[in-house]
Amino acid sequence: LMMLVARADGTISLYDPSRSRPIKSWLSPAGGRPVTRIAWSKTRPAVFFALDAASKLYFFNLLQDEGGPVHTESPQGGAEIAGMCVPDPSAGARGSLKATVCVAFRSGHVQLHTLAGKFSEQVKSEGEEVAALFRRWFEAC
């Protein structure tokens, strides 16, 4: 079990609950802006998402790039994002939902975005690779 923490300085840290210090940190992918929301993918153990105060959504894939986000999205037309979440696709009727990110705008509108396969479909042995990566980071700190 690992825990992601978003910080006001834009830093994202990964904690093992048995330690008081993070085993890995990403220095402000948001350019120093606060990271306001963070969520693990429900379908890919190597993927998580972060939202910053400027309404940018960052996609991380730890197996593709350990150093930072692999993709960034911003809303069109200057819309402000108030929040985001990653619903559990298995919670749909017979687990029929696709992997999505739910985005809530300050205007009150909500959008559900279906994730591309590279962010939603688990690759072979992904769980084992992520566990090995976490062990390596744990042992290095």
Image (cartoon, rainbow, N blue to C red):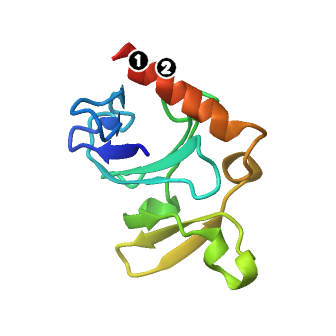
Toward the right, the furthest residue is 124
Report which quarter residue 128 is drawn in: top right
Residue 85 x/y as whole percent: 46, 65
Residue sitting nearer the eye, 95 or 12: 95
Residue 129 x/y as whole percent: 64, 30
Residue sitting nearer the eye, 31 or 26: 26
Residue 18 x/y as whole percent: 29, 37
The amino acid at mark 1 is Glu
Q: Residue at point 26% right, 35% down?
A: 32
Report which quarter residue 71 is drawn in: top right
Secondary structure found at label 2: helix
Q: CA distance from mark 1 to mark 2?
A: 5 Å
Residue on which the image places disc 2: 136
Q: Residue at point 49% right, 49% down?
A: 49
Viewed as shown, does residue 133 lie left or right of 1? Answer: right
Callouts 1 and 2 close, C-beta under 8 Å = yes
Residue on which the image places disc 1: 139
- Disc on res. 59: none
The amino acid at mark 2 is Arg
Residue sitting nearer the eye, 94 or 51: 94
Q: Is residue 41 above or below residue 132?
A: below
Is disc 1 surrounded by few (<14), some (14 to 19) or many (20+) residues within 10 Å? few
Q: Is residue 116 above or below residue 45?
A: below
Image quadrant occupied by the C terminus: top left
**Total numbered labels placed on residues in the image:** 2
Viewed as shown, does residue 97 lie left or right of 70? Answer: right
Secondary structure found at label 1: helix
Q: Is residue 140 above or below residue 62?
A: above
Report which quarter residue 13 is drawn in: top left
